Image (cartoon, grey):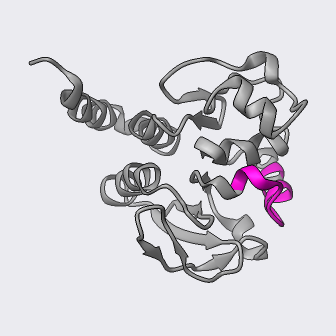
């Protein structure tokens, strides 16, 4: 069974976590585990209290198969204890790593954008939060998630394409279902 760890900071973004965690758990049967900075529950922007399974620096996290960093303003305040080394090791081990919104700053700090296409909440914004990050020249200005190898990045306004991109790394054989998921959500914005 695939195990995914979702990293939630205080004030985590509900709309970013919901699509990816639900798609992975409900449709792909991925086991979701939650890590917070201290291992204590964290409250989302919308007031949802999420219980934690682990703290960010828990050594057992390295056993997970997939790492997802959900946006929160807290990521913008600096490096989170234990995260950079964990992300670098996960990437070196060939495990998928995904960040959305301010969660992309942790990927930038870990050097995972070096030589890779990526996106975030804007190139100027990302460079402002992580000055001189490696790979800035590969930034893609797009409203959708970007996948390069096993690294997925997205702005905070792309939770559905982020969910789909992460799902494609976990279960490429489920492409038909994943494409249907994207189409289902896109209907909200169609004129039909």
Q: Is residue 155 above or below residue 89?
A: above
The rendered magenta stretch, by its main secondary structure, is classed as: helix
Does residue 97 appear in this view? Answer: no
102 left or right of 13? right
Q: Quadrant of residue 191?
A: top left
Q: Which residues are magenta?
A: 75-88
Q: Residue placed at 44% from the left, 60% from the top? A: 30
Q: Residue placed at 60% from the left, 36% from the top? A: 152
How many numbered discs, if any?
0
Q: In this view of the protein, which residue sits in the foreground, 101 or 27? A: 101
155 left or right of 36? left
| Rendered location of residue 46, percent (x, y) | 41, 63
| Rendered location of residue 127, percent (x, y) | 80, 30
Q: Is residue 13 above or below residue 144?
A: below
| Rendered location of residue 182, percent (x, y) | 30, 32
Does residue 9 appear in this view? Answer: yes
1 left or right of 114? left
Residue that extends furthest to the bottom in the rendered view of this protein: 40
Magenta region includes residue 86:
yes
Q: Residue placed at 71% from the left, 79% from the top? A: 38
Q: In this view of the protein, which residue sits in the foreground, 148 or 101? A: 101
Q: Residue placed at 27% from the left, 37% from the top? A: 181
Residue that extends furthest to the left in the rendered view of this protein: 192
Q: Quadrant of the C terminus?
A: top left
Q: In this view of the protein, which residue sits in the foreground, 131 or 93? A: 131
173 left or right of 9? left
| Rendered location of residue 87, percent (x, y) | 77, 52
């Amino acid at each position: 069974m695939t195990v995914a760890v979702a990293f939630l900071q205080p004030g985590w973004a509900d709309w970013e976590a919901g699509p990816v965690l639900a798609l992975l758990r409900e449709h792909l049967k991925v086991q979701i585990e939650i890590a917070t900075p201290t291992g204590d529950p964290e409250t989302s922007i919308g007031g949802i209290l999420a219980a934690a399974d682990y703290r960010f620096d828990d050594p057992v996290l390295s056993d997970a198969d997939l790492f997802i960093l959900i946006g929160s303003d807290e990521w913008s305040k600096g490096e989170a204890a234990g995260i950079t080394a964990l992300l670098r090791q996960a990437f070196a081990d060939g495990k998928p790593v995904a960040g959305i919104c301010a969660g992309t700053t942790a990927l930038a700090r870990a050097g995972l954008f070096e030589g890779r296409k990526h996106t975030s909440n804007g190139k100027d914004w990302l460079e402002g939060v992580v000055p001189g990050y490696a790979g800035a020249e590969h930034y893609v200005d797009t409203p959708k998630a970007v996948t390069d190898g096993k690294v997925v990045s997205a702005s905070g306004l792309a939770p559905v394409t982020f969910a789909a991109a992460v799902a494609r790394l976990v279960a490429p054989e489920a492409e038909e279902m994943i494409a249907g998921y994207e189409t289902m959500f896109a209907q909200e914005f169609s004129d039909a």
